[in-house]
Image (cartoon, rainbow, N blue to C red):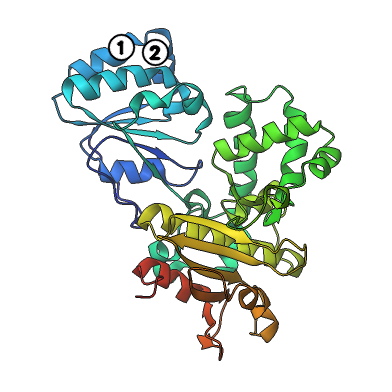
Amino acid sequence: MTTNHTPLFNRILVPPKQSFFLLGPRGSGKSTWLRSAYRDAHVIDLLSEETYQQLLARPSLFADEMRALKSGGWVVVDEIQRLPQLLNEVHRFIEEKRLRFVLCGSSARKLRRAGVNLLAGRALNRAMHPFVPEELGARFELDSALQYGLLPVVFNSEAKAETLSAYAQFYLKEEIQAEALVKNLPGFARFLPVAALFHGQTINVSTIARDAGVARTTVSGYLEILEETLLCFRLPAYEAKLRVRERRLPKWYWCDPGLARSMKRYSGPVVPEERGALFEGLVAQAIRAYRDYRGICDTMSYWAPAGGTLTEVDFLLEQGGHIVAVEAKSGRDFTENWCRGLRAVAELKGLKRRLIVYPHGPVLGTQDGIEVLPFREFCSLLASGDLWPT
């Protein structure tokens, strides 16, 4: 299918040459990007109810369409999680006709349960994230990003607050209710704003269960749903020297500050009490995006000492045995107190660099080698590939 559609912004995702899964939260711009990147591909849009119902009733129609295509061509299957049984046919036509597939979806839940391993080695994995500053250029505004987030569906809206509110309702209706992911929809609806309060914190399942009025085991399942529908992610604790009994809980982040606020039903200007978590989450998401897009690190984690003090480091990025430590601070002006966590890890084996990221201001440096960067400068560092000192 050919289209003249052109995206508003150039996304930095580089598509591979072979078949791949493209997963990302709803509204992250996957379909828009696909229309631009694969203008001549054959498209199967499972978000179309007519197409979905036809293939649900007669899955053989998919094979009939594939047989009619030229060998080696591209096929885009949008919202593949709605009919994961099609993966068997995808596997067959990769082998038989050397067709190349882009398998796009907003949920990994049904795909994992349907045996995506059938395509192991035949389809790579790629992710689409909310916008990063590199993609927006001069249009990026930090305060707006903290208030409304950077999901393309919201960023491009003239009524951002209303779009965010509608997003939350659409998620409940289309992703949760329509796919029958939970039995107790009212309970899940009560759970969402409570889970949003833990943005940037370690997860306390008991507290969430009590406040949402659901069982602990149910909360654990709900958290998995948020991860598998790609709205949230966990950041593990750094455990190089921790004994099992000292193992710390992961920290919890929403993939977008606007989403975290909308789930709490916040729409006004960001208040000081929430700014710290929102900014830390934005830094976490920027690192995560560049890990997936550019491979800037192998793993990311957070560091906290076993003694249970308030000292911690927000992010440890590891690659090839080397570590870069990153601390996010939402304050306006640099103070020496910001360095406490980074100084606590100064002797960490493999540590190559220590960075503090703050919203706005000059690039600074301390006498003991800690670099202080405004958020835009930090994102430019991630984009340039110069994060790791030579």
To which residue does mark 2 refer?
54
Q: Position of residue 332 (x, y in %)?
A: 65, 81
For residue 365, above or below residue 155: below
**Is 199 positioned to the left or the right of 69 in the image?**
right
Q: Which residue is mark 1?
A: 61
Quadrant of the rendered structure where residue 49 is?
top left
Residue type of the residue flagged with mark 1: Leu
Kind of element beneath mark 2: helix
Q: Quadrant of the C terminus?
A: bottom left
Q: Indicate the secondary structure of the residue bearing disc 1.
A: helix
Quadrant for the N terminus, please: top left
Q: Residue at x 77, y 62 (%)?
A: 308
Query: Can residue 210 be seen from the camera position used here?
Result: yes
Residue visible at 52% across and 79% down in the picture: 373
Q: Between 194 and 364, which is closer to the camera in this rendering?
A: 364
Q: Nearer the viewer, residue 383 or 166?
A: 383
Q: Given contact means CB atoms under 8 Å apart, are the residues at marks 1 and 2 in contact?
A: yes
Q: Is residue 141 visible in this depiction of the protein?
A: no
Residue ID at (51%, 52%):
151
Image position of 134 (left or right of 43) = right
Q: Is residue 188 left or right of residue 35?
A: right
